[in-house]
Image: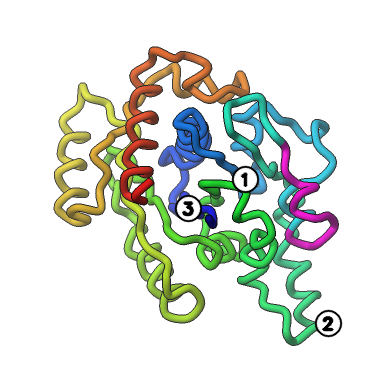
Amino acid sequence: MSAKIISLVNQKGGVGKTTTSINLAAALGKEGKKTLLIDLDPQGNASIGCGYNNGDFKYDIYDVMVQNCTIEQGIIKTKFKNLSIIPSTLNLAGVEVEFVKKMLEDQEFRQNERLKTVLTPIQDKYDYIIIDCQPSLGISTMNALVASNSVIIPVQCEFFALEGITQLLNTIITVQSNMNPDLKIEGVLLTMLDGRTNIGLEVIEEVRKYFKNKVFNTIIPRLVRLVEAPSHGIPISDYDPVSRATLAYQNLAKEVISRNGD
């Protein structure tokens, strides 16, 4: 059975997108699902959050996408249960230039379909493929949207939470219309909730009114332990198994699994 491919997308930074990518992937692994995390951000924060630095691997997602290596060569099996990763480095920032060169050399080359093409050989080896996108709607994010079955949109429980969401939704509609008609919104995830403030509760109400049943029941709290975990290269479930954040991501993983009928 082919893997469910889910991209974490929001062009606004600081919404908990990478934190969610790491911890959702780890939580799915702990639920017994073979999971591949793809770091599609040149900053490489998802790679660092899983304990990998530049010198720890030979190939990254850039090498995979420009065919410097096979996708199998780019995959690293982590020490965490059922979790593998294709890491990223600053090299990924050059993928747009490489793709322009390829388009000049080969008129048949489709730059937005590259990730979809390279994922095809390994899709039946995983239950879930989670893609952490960079905070922009550039070429790599477009590749993720074309390759994905669905998207999760993290929205932080703070003022201006919905800023830029209209642009993102318009991009998703464009992809659905022209490149990936099967792309769905998996759900909207409320993140970074500080229960001590009224604004967080107001944002929850606003987002649920706007997106209705697309909003996950799980809400990710703002916790120091959740911020600390990536600096140790460990998902929150291994860093602090009894944390409220660990429970939240376990619940999110169960919601995702339930929505996909697994």
**Residue positioned most to the bottom:** 107
Q: Residue at x 44, y 17 (%)?
A: 225
**Mark sitting earlier along the chain (3/1):** 3
Residue denoted by label 2 = 105
Q: Toward which corner of the image does residue 112 lie, by quadrant?
A: bottom right
Q: Which residues are magenta?
A: 65-76
Asked if the magenta segment contains residue 68, the reply would be: yes
What is the three-letter code of the residue carrying label 2?
Glu
Q: CA distance from mark 2 to mark 1?
A: 28 Å
What is the three-letter code of the residue carrying label 3?
Ile
Q: How is the image coloured?
A: rainbow
User: CB of mark 3 within 8 Å of CB of mark 1?
Assistant: no
Q: Position of residue 248 (x, y in %)?
A: 34, 28
What is the three-letter code of the residue carrying label 1?
Asp
Image disc number at residue 6:
3
Q: Position of residue 86 (x, y in %)?
A: 68, 44
Q: Residue at x 51, y 54 (%)?
A: 5
Q: Is residue 54 left or right of residue 20?
A: right
Q: Is residue 83 left or right of residue 118?
A: left
Secondary structure, mark 2, is helix
For residue 194, above or below residue 7: above
Label count reads 3
**Mark sitting earlier along the chain (2/3):** 3
Mark 2 or 3: the one toward you? 3
Q: Residue at x 52, y 16 (%)?
A: 239
Residue denoted by label 1 = 39
Q: Residues within 10 Å of mark 3 (few under 14, many from 20)?
A: many
For residue 37, above or below residue 81: below
Instruction: Residue 203: tell me if it is visible.
Output: yes
**Mark sitting earlier along the chain (2/1):** 1
